[in-house]
Amino acid sequence: MEKKYKILAEFIKDLSAETTDIENYIFTKDNISNYKLHIDISTKPLKNKMAEVSISTKFKNDDSTKKSSYFEMIYAVIVKINDEVNTKEELEPIFLKSVPNEVYPKIEIIFLDLLKYSGYPNVKFEKKVNFDELFKKRSD
């Protein structure tokens, strides 16, 4: 299947690692296995059949205790859409499946490095993100 878009640029738009003090660090280190990965995708139309796809990745403790550390990255991808693509039904899978599937391996490496250099070197994401499955669930 031919790609109906071209990635023109990708960059880290925002990056945050918040561990406020040593108690927070120790608490997070002891409880990092309770942290969950959250992903959100937003799209902003640009001129000339281009769009910015922003993939927000958050790694946080859903129990939201004040002692928790917080990690977030927004990765932006500038995409040029082929001229024959004109409908929402054609655009949504590009923005919500194809582009994220293509760039996510880089996002995961960068994000795991952020965690590693923030003092949490042994973090691994148990499940691989399946954007096809997430898109299908959204459509159901």
Image (cartoon, grey):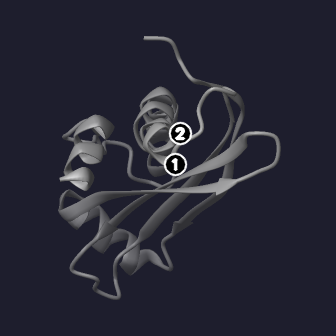
Of the pair 128 and 102, the residue shown nearer to us: 102
Q: Residue at x 63, y 26 (%)?
A: 84
Q: Is 2 on the left or on the right of 120, as rendered?
A: right
**Residue 25's spot in the image, x, y percent?**
39, 70
Q: Measuring 59% from the left and 38% from the top, which residue is drawn there?
A: 86
**Residue type of the residue flagged with mark 1:** Leu
What number of labels is visible?
2
Q: Secondary structure at mark 2?
A: helix
Where is residue 85 shown, x and y percent of the image? Answer: 59, 32
Quarter the N terminus occupies? top left
Q: Secondary structure at mark 1?
A: helix
Instruction: Tell whether 73 sits left or right of 26.
Output: right
Q: Residue furthest top?
A: 1
| Placement of 4 over or under 79, stated as above or below | above
Circle 2 crowding by C-alpha within 10 Å: few under 14, some 14–19, many from 20: some
| Disc 1 crowd, CA 10 A, few/some/many (<14, 14-19, 20+) | some
Please tell me whether residue 83 is drawn above or below residue 139 in the rendered image.
above
Where residue 10 appears, as percent x and y from the top left, is 68, 37
Q: Residue at x 34, y 67 (%)?
A: 60
Which residue has dot 1 on it? 114
**How far apart in space, not on screen, are marks 1 and 2 (Cα)?**
6 Å
Q: Are marks 1 and 2 in contact (CB under 8 Å)?
A: yes
Q: In the drawing, what numbered circle is on residue 110? A: 2
Task: Using the image as rendered, state which of residue 18 and residue 138 is in the foreground.
Answer: 138
